[in-house]
Image (spheres, rainbow, N blue to C red):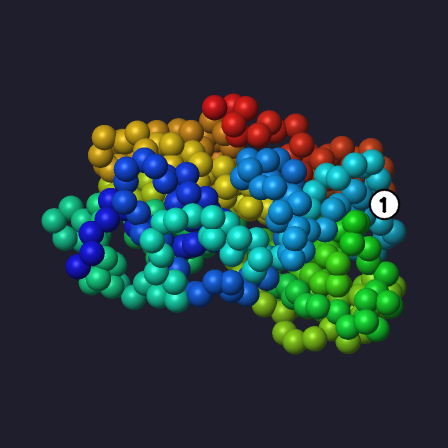
Amino acid sequence: METYDLIIVGAGPAGSTFAKALEGSGKRALLIDKQDFPRDKTCAGWVTPTVMETLDIDLAEYGNGRTLQPVRRFRIGMMGQPAVENDHGSVISYGIRRCEFDDYLLGRTNTPKQLGVPVKSITRKDGNWLINDTWSAPLLVGAGGHFCPVARLIGDGPGSHETVVAAKEIEFEMTHKQAKTCEARGDTPEIWFCRDLKGYAWVFRKGNYLNVGLGREDNHKLTKHLQDFVETMKATGRLPEDLPGRFKGHAYLLYDHAGRALVDDGLLLIGDAAGLAYTQSGEGIRPAIESALLAADVVRRAADFSATSLQAYGDAIVERFGHRGSKTEKGFQVPGWIRMPLASTLMRSHWFTRKVVTEKWFLHQKVAPLAANS
């Protein structure tokens, strides 16, 4: 039996950032993930300059041999009507491939790792958690996404009415012919809102790689919505006619509608395991990174790993992201005051699509980097 001070389950951006932030603290950590890295991780994959700054990533170094697509424009529209294109005048985001990005972050930490190891059992004994009857620690940090086994230990909180976003997407390297005929531009991601305002689709070109997907607040007719969108994009030349393979599905919780507790005795959740994706956009990389840094700060200073001691992390999340909304409130992406036909009109507005949809909902440009608030 190998004993550590804490075990991190999930080696994605949240887990690897948390592990790196704890280095030098004197606490012995182990990082476990069910997959080997680099691993396939389909994701629209845009990160803001703020994320890169928070992670202290050298853009020139990262871009050497990896996909780093500068984004200066966005095309925003509602399905069934023309899109509005806004030029922001400077780089406001970067397109990355998660298989590269996650592997890069993981490679920066010297924390001991067990990769390609599924968590088959978690048991409690003498104040410690035992993983697979092999590794032991008084603290488990859940960083394994929506279905993280550590999150299952804490549970989903009171009630069962959380808004779970279901998404399907595909990412592939285009052939020369596909790249030549595809009208989607690398520096201009496209976001298309469903007419019922319960989700949106996207087309994001990153060099020769193309990512296409659609997410909605539940699985109801998700495939049909996706098929209709893809056919429309093909007909208008935004997508190649011959998309390869099957779209992959995944799920996550929106912050305002999640009911998961963030801590319990010897348990702590970060990233998508905690249900921190931004409510209006579903974007989860920045919340994952920031939650990991906030959690590491609390764990570094904690006298013990009781729920009482770890609650400082929950308080820090509320201070950073605000109080969660009513658990009975429905709706995905857009606030309740935006309804048809107002939404149709607003999505034709350059000011609204730029200042509200892109800069506020998706990029959170006016939210200062975490370091500036600490």
Q: Give above or below for 221 relative to 242.
A: above
User: Horizontal and vertical percent for residue 61?
Assistant: 62, 47
User: Horizontal and vertical percent for residue 67?
Assistant: 67, 56
Looking at the rendered structure, the secondary structure element under dot 1 is: strand
User: Horizontal and vertical percent for residue 140?
Assistant: 30, 48
**Any part of residue 314 in sight:** no
Horizontal arrangement in the rendering, residue 240 relative to residue 330 (left or right): right
Residue drawn at the location 83% of the way across and 36% of the way down = 89
Q: Quadrant of residue 60?
A: top right
Q: How many marks?
A: 1
Residue assigned mark 1: 84
Residue drawn at the location 23% of the way across and 30% of the way down = 303
Residue drawn at the location 34% of the way across and 47% of the way down = 141
**Which of the image's four quarters has the N terminus?**
bottom left
Residue drawn at the location 86% of the way across and 67% of the way down = 180
**Any part of residue 31 in sight:** yes
Amino acid carrying label 1: it is: Val
